[in-house]
Image (cartoon, grey):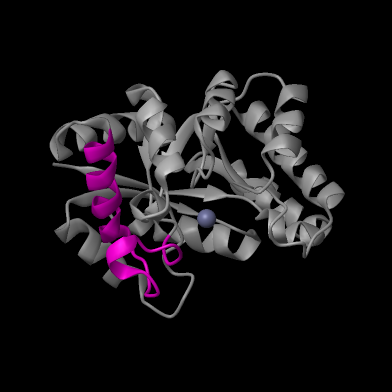
Amino acid sequence: MQVYDTHCHIGLDEVPPDEDHARAVAAQVDAMLVVGIDAATSAAARALQRLDGVRWSAGLHPNDSHAFAAEWPQIDALARDPSCAAIGETGLDCYRDRTPLAEQERSFRAHLELARELDKPVVIHCRDAFEPLFRVLADEPPIHGVMHCFSGGVDEARRALDFGLHVSFAGPLTYKKSDELRRACAFVPLDRALVETDAPFLPPQSRRGKRNEPALVVETLAKFAEVRGMSLEEAAAATYANAIALFG
Ligand SMILES: [Zn+2]
């Protein structure tokens, strides 16, 4: 079995990324996308390519969009590196109101333009912001990419799929109250579904309140398989192939 964690932030906290990576490989998680949230973490993600199976992205998190003017030139330059697999994470977040929505939208649109110019997938963060986010996407010509840590129901999943996006499921899929999310998981076509950890955040049910790491994507994948009535191995193979096609 091979498993792909399509969204993690190893190296973001005090745990050495080599340790997270080694435990992931031992758990058959032999590929991961390390996602940048600003210029410094995007550059750090690029440096983690030294680890087997690591791909990386460059972007500015919506909650840091107030720093757009200062951060963007370096993120733009990093994104043009041929080894950069994706643009983001970007998107909109109405849950935390640190940054006005207009500033978030400006940054989001810049990411979408760059992704289109470079023909790279975009990694989209959406928290309590489906309506404004879908409005921006409707303005933009077709793109490819992923709704990371998907948090909606069947309706929102259908709309994301209609934009050509993949839908990625994280630890909340395993939470007891996430029935609506599990219905969305059962709905998404198998060739458009991905799994991720968002580590070190959002640990799955068995580790709630603790730190998350890429090895734990297997727990989310097991729930994904259960929800869809398939074996863990089949779920791994399908989501792995999807991730390779999107991020390499
Ligand atoms: Zn993230």
Q: Nearer the viewer, residue 4 or 171?
A: 171
For residue 46, above or below residue 240: below
Q: Nearer the viewer, residue 54 or 77?
A: 54
Q: Residue at x 52, y 48 (%)?
A: 57
Q: Nearer the viewer, residue 51 or 8?
A: 8
Residue 155's image quarter?
top right
Q: Residue at x 82, y 44 (%)?
A: 106
For residue 29, above or below residue 85: below
Marks counted in the figure total 0
> Does residue 207 show up?
yes
Per the rendered image, the range of residues in magenta is: 199-227
Which residue is farthest bottom? 14
Q: Residue at x 46, y 34 (%)?
A: 167
Residue 142 shown left or right of residue 165 in the figure: right
- Where residue 67 sits: x, y (%)? 78, 62
Q: Nearer the viewer, residue 104 or 245?
A: 104
Residue 14's image quarter?
bottom left
Residue 36's image quarter?
bottom right
For residue 242, above or below residue 70: above
- Where residue 19 sits: x, y (%)? 27, 72
Residue 129 shown left or right of residue 208 in the figure: right
Residue 3 is covered by the magenta coloring: no
